[in-house]
Amino acid sequence: MNILNFPDFTLVNRVVPKVAFYSHLEVTARMKSAFIENVEQVVWLYKLAPSNLHVTDGKDVHELTIFLIKLKKGISDCSDIFRYIDSKLPRHTFFIIQQDNRYQLLVNYKQWKDASAGTFEIIKSFSTDWLSEEMLSLRLDSSSNMDTLYESLVRQIASTQITSSQQNLHQAVFQTIQIEAIKKEMAAIRKKELKEQQPQKKFALHQKYMQLKKKLEEHI
């Protein structure tokens, strides 16, 4: 199966026994149970590395693994499972989630927590809408090294979910998180302002809302 139409030399197409997928990871009993109950099959679909792409190794990214995860019928969202498991995987990973005849691309953007121990910290998760096989797309853009290739693939999946105009992906993701937090606080204050009956308190809430709006404009 070459669902992304990547070059044949990147194709692994190997079924990974579910127990092998999590047995060597420090996975909680709850997550192990959720994984077993929700996942039908795991396929190691692609390996992207300097050895087969003939690009320079990255400073942070050395290999990209893409798994095809086939969900059991009736299951539509288990992103929290893959966010947890991905935090334990010692490599940069992408997931193609399959539910019946529709697909979703998922990436948990992460950074090294302790490179010597092979541990990561997930910063933010991004996913596409559910797509038909014909609409499923991910490009292997020309990249000088593995770091820039990873950034390209993350941006393709995240698309407009990254709301910062920062060119540096790391900064853009962190600023996106800040923007989301500001918007959430603005919505909460606006709700309080609409309910507030006392003019002085209502004015104070409006002032706070306008301050946040200005802060938001500075981040976008």
Image (tube, rainbow, N blue to C red):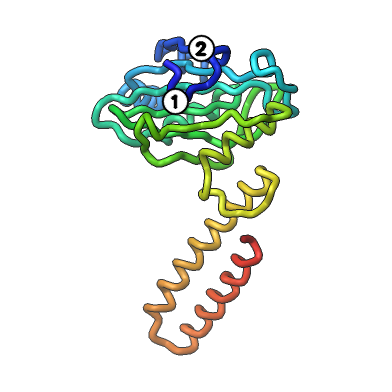
Task: Tell me which label, 1 or 2, sits earlier in the chain.
Answer: 2
Between 214 and 4, the residue placed more toward the observer is 4
Residue 11 point in image, percent of width and height: 52, 14
Q: Quadrant of the N terminus?
A: top left
Q: Is residue 10 above or below residue 106?
A: above
Give SS at disc 1: loop
Q: Is residue 30 above or below residue 171?
A: above
Residue 34 point in image, percent of width and height: 35, 27
Say if residue 173 shows up in the picture: yes
- Residue at coordinates 55% horizontally, 23% vertically from top-left? 89
What type is the residue that disc 1 sits on? Thr
- Residue at coordinates 47% horizontally, 28% vertically from top-left? 95
State the residue position of label 2.
12
| Quadrant in which residue 115 is drawn | top right
| Quadrant in which residue 29 is drawn | top left
Question: Mark 1 to mark 2: distance in Å?
Answer: 28 Å
Give SS at disc 2: strand
Residue 202 point in image, percent of width and height: 46, 83
Between 111 and 23, the residue placed more toward the observer is 111
Foreground mark, 1 or 2?
Answer: 2
Is residue 41 rendered to the left or right of residue 214?
Answer: left
Q: Is residue 19 above or below residue 69?
A: above
* Farthest residue, direction bottom: 199
State the residue position of label 1.
28
| Residue 96 numbered mark, or none | none
Label 2 Cα neighbours within 10 Å, binned few <14 / some 14-19 / many ≥20: some
Label 1 Cα neighbours within 10 Å, binned few <14 / some 14-19 / many ≥20: few
Q: Quadrant of the C terminus?
A: bottom right
What type is the residue that disc 2 sits on? Val
Say if residue 114 shows up in the picture: no
